[in-house]
Image (tube, rainbow, N blue to C red):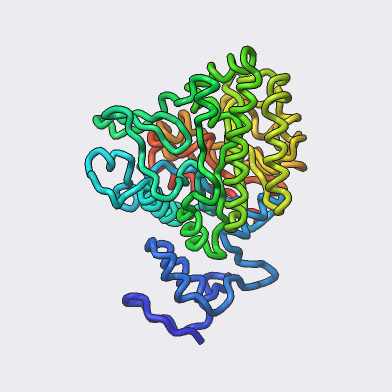
Amino acid sequence: MLSVKLGFIDLALSEIIFGTILVPVDRIIKTWFHSQGKPHLGRFFTNVGNLSTIQDGERLVTHKERYMKAVNHGVSDTVPVDGALDLIHAQRILGKAPMSSFIFLTQKKDDVDMNDVAKHNQRLLDETAMKLDFDCLIVNDWNIYPEGFRPRFIDETSYVDHLGRIHKMKADIKTVYWVDGIVKTPSDLEKLELPEPEDLNMDIVKETIDAAADEYPVMGWCHSVVHGPYQVRGGIDKLAIDIYRQPEFARKLIEKFFTYEIGMIKRLIDMGVDIIVEGDDLADIKGPMFSPKILREFFFPYIRKFIEECHSSNIPVMKHSDGNLYPILDELINLGYDGIHPIEPAVMDIGKVKQLYGNRIFLRGNVDCVHILPYGTEEDVRRDVRRCIDAAAKGGGFILSDSNSLHSNVKTENIRAMVDEARKYGKYT
């Protein structure tokens, strides 16, 4: 028998019955600590007992079991739900301020680097995801820096990051955004030194995996051979022109970033992430940003190797790309992807994609984050959640999420409504 004191609550039971579901007390304790934003204490108090119990042949599942069941085309107790959170939602929900690279302008501290910023923010995101009752935790490869890395300022408000991208800081609106890259010529590319995998500080990954324990899956959101090359080059237009006018230069640039990202995903997989996202956009609402011929020649061979690297360790790969993917969807799926996000609702029909490809890939999406989540009412959000579930949840293999991200313009209360409606309407049993 487990005896624990939580504040004014005394628990001295091996299990508690809520309705017709038999719930182990260690699960209740763990959930309580998660709701308080202290998952590490929840793990301390729940090293005994069983996280799931069978009652009338039904299993009380963890977030990880629920999520991975959908990834593997299965049906769990309910549709899993998650989303890519902007830090503004963490600040609203937790009452804790995020950090940014502004700290290097306002505080001249030699003992702070970008890994300190990344760790602080990742803790906020993990805690917020748990408080929102998301089923997955996410780490982003672009928040992983070399040990001791600090931005290299080129003027009072612009700096170069660890990948050679130039960012601009606007203090009046507290925003940092990409504006350019340092590779202007082939000789610049020769000088560009991307970090070695072993030099990267992986603390945000380790801490997130530790916080997830066996309760949550961890998704490694990565990039491959489009975003990095065009951003360090200064724009997608420049990369497109390079492909036609300087194809060997373009190949060397793409190859350099591919080598870096392969090293990144190897480290993520070795550390224990459960899912990898290949997150480079390939389309806008009009269609693919490159012709199928160019994609096949310059990008798809690397993406196939990216997927194969993950599959060699039995790690599923989800493709993220906004836009209208219909013209290349067959080819993308034939590359070996296990899932796709977000199936942008303005130009793609998630029900149609489910009908055509649901036996081959899982789907993640696609609550409208352009109009409904930022500007809609609670009922608008609930209606859109039901649309997604009706179209894509039957038979499993579906994760309810945003149609791109839960960006800063999204109403935080609409995120809560999205999760709540998913839990109510998305039950399989």
Residue lying at 54% horizontally and 42% vertically, measured from the top left: 401
Up-down: is 107 above or below 328?
below
Residue lying at 67% horizontally and 67% vertically, measured from the top left: 58
Q: Quadrant of the C terminus?
A: bottom right
Residue lying at 56% horizontally and 59% vertically, measured from the top left: 63
Residue 3 appears at what percent x and percent y?
Answer: 44, 84
Up-down: is 429 above or below 279?
below
Residue 200 appears at what percent x and percent y?
Answer: 49, 49
Instruction: Place residue 105 in its image quadrant.
Output: top left
Q: Going by the image, does 131 lie left or right of 389?
A: left
Farthest residue in the top direction? 245
Q: Going by the image, does 329 lie left or right of 132?
A: right
Residue 208 appears at what percent x and percent y?
Answer: 48, 57
Farthest residue in the bottom direction? 1
Q: Going by the image, does 281 lie left or right of 326?
A: left
Residue lying at 53% horizontally and 27% vertically, measured from the top left: 189
Up-down: is 375 above or below 358?
above
* Nearest to the observer: residue 189 or residue 328: 189
Residue 302 appears at what percent x and percent y?
Answer: 69, 34
Q: Is residue 92 visible?
A: no
* Nearest to the observer: residue 233 or residue 398: 233
